[in-house]
Image (cartoon, rainbow, N blue to C red):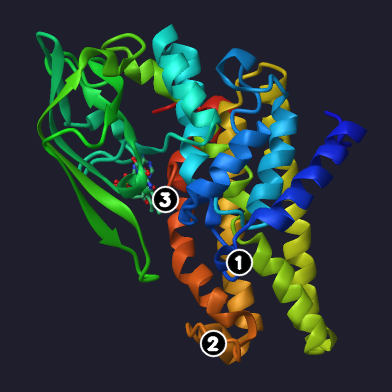
Amino acid sequence: MDFVFTPEQERFRAEIREFLEKEIPPEFRRKPENNWIRGFCPELSRKLGQKGWIGLAWPKKYGGQEKSYMDRLVLTEELVCSGAPVFSHWFGDRQVGPAILAHGTEEQKQKFLTGITRGEIQFGVGMSEPEAGSDLASLQLRAIEEGDHFTINGQKVWTSGIHNAHYIYMVARTDPDTPKHRGISELVVDVNLPGITIRPLKDMTGEYDLNEVFFDNVKAPLDSLIGEKNHGWYQIAEQLDFERSGVERLMSNYPLLRDTVEYVRKAGLNKVDWIRRKLAQLEAEFEVGRLLVYRVAWMLSQGKVPNYEAAMAKGYGTAFEQRLSNAITQILGMYGQIADDSEDIPLIGRAVSAYLYCPAYTLQGGTSEILKGIVATRGLGLPTK
Ligand SMILES: Cc1cc2nc3c(=O)[nH]c(=O)nc-3n(C[C@H](O)[C@H](O)[C@H](O)COP(=O)(O)OP(=O)(O)OC[C@H]3O[C@@H](n4cnc5c(N)ncnc54)[C@H](O)[C@@H]3O)c2cc1C
């Protein structure tokens, strides 16, 4: 592994920074944390698409640039650290596009990949159900082939941003009569089809980006199927590696860390021993996490499959994000508990939002316990039973 970025990658980083400096709308600069999943701004995604910065590693014939995963890492690091509101293309770029690239038909690639790279098509991801989270193979939502369509019945839950999306990329049971890991397929379904109802779920920060999605006799065309019917379980494993391994699992609160360090300096709190030590420790932990994330990008760029490495990076990164929110809340003292949006409060209540949101990190994209299981079995070779 080479720890140094190439001069071209450094130039690319500078170009992205300059672009974002100009293009991030002011309303998203005020509270930049978690904007990869909470910042919905299709206009910015379209501008990034025009630059060729969505689907960066994909083939040129689908709008990609055929750049390496290390180049993509440089891009995503800048997007997340600057708080760019990129949710409208994030799922498409991160995991749906690669899934379609790996398993889709030529027509699906032309339609969806070019739409994603232009920043014009938005996706939600429908995996979890009320009785199927960690144990995803227990999913009950059915998509039964009937003539020229699938008839879909069932429910998804915790579906981030689906209320702003055009399509739901989902897993469904297409053969209810086989053992649970078989008979599952991947589908991409238009969320505007009759019979789909989206119901909002507010989290404890008071904001809204999660949903329940209900399917009541929805008729989706047969070309909604991605890859081989009843083979979805074997297709999604790789897609989950993409979901878990990105910089967003470590850097969602990076702007808060950066601005806290500045606040601490200005307020003279850097003379307080425990605060100085806490920030130094966080900085060291952050750099460790960064190397774990870099390793995954490097492996992808070498065509390797990073399944336990992605689990390690996500497990470490999300636990770090929780320690970070906790520490900053302590450092700010009483101010760290005020959720008010007022300019009179240091960091305008951002620490409270980060603190209240941070339990989600070790759940979304696979819980820490599940990730530890992957590291134990696939990484360390421990027995499964
Ligand atoms: C903010 C947020 C956004 C999300 N966005 C999406 C989305 O867009 N699309 C989507 O499909 N889902 C989404 N999810 C759902 C997420 O993927 C699930 O919450 C997660 O997979 C866990 O499933 P569960 O909530 O059903 O918990 P469970 O699976 O019921 O787990 C409960 C507890 O038991 C533990 N546990 C379960 N099984 C084991 C085991 N085998 N060994 C050890 N411990 C175990 C878990 O670690 C956890 O602590 C989101 C969740 C959050 C919090």
259 sits to left or right of 1: left
Q: Residue at x 47, y 33 (%)?
A: 92
The structure residue drawn at horizontal position 59% and vertical position 59%, both measured from the top left corner, is 321
Residue behind label 3 places its C-beta within 8 angstroms of ligand 1? yes
Dot 2 alpha-carbon crowd within 10 angstroms: few under 14, some 14 to 19, many 20 or more: few
Secondary element under disc 3, as helix, strand or loop, is: loop
Q: Tell me if label 3 and label 2 are in contact, CB under 8 Å.
A: no
Residue 192 in the image: state x and y as whole percent: 22, 37
Q: Is residue 357 visible?
A: yes
Q: Nearer the viewer, mark 3 or mark 2?
A: 2
| Residue placed under numbered mark 2 in the picture | 342
Q: Which mark is residue 26?
A: 1
Inter-mark Cα distance, 3 to 1: 30 Å
For marks 3 and 2, the one nearer the N-term is: 2
Position of residue 318 measured from the top left corner of the image (x, y, whole percent): 56, 53
Quadrant of image for the C terminus: top left
Element under disc 1? helix
Q: Nearer the viewer, residue 171 or 71?
A: 71
Quarter placement of the N terminus: top right
Closer to the camera: disc 3 or disc 1? 1
Residue 275: image location, x then y, percent: 75, 80
Q: Quadrant of residue 152?
A: top left
Identity, as a three-letter code, of the amino acid under mark 1: Pro
Within the image, what quadrant is residue 159 found in?
A: top left
Numbered label tally: 3
Q: Position of residue 222 (x, y in %)?
A: 22, 13
Separation (CA) of disc 2 from disc 1: 16 Å
Amino acid type shown at disc 2: Ser
In this rendering, position of residue 372 left or right of residue 287: left
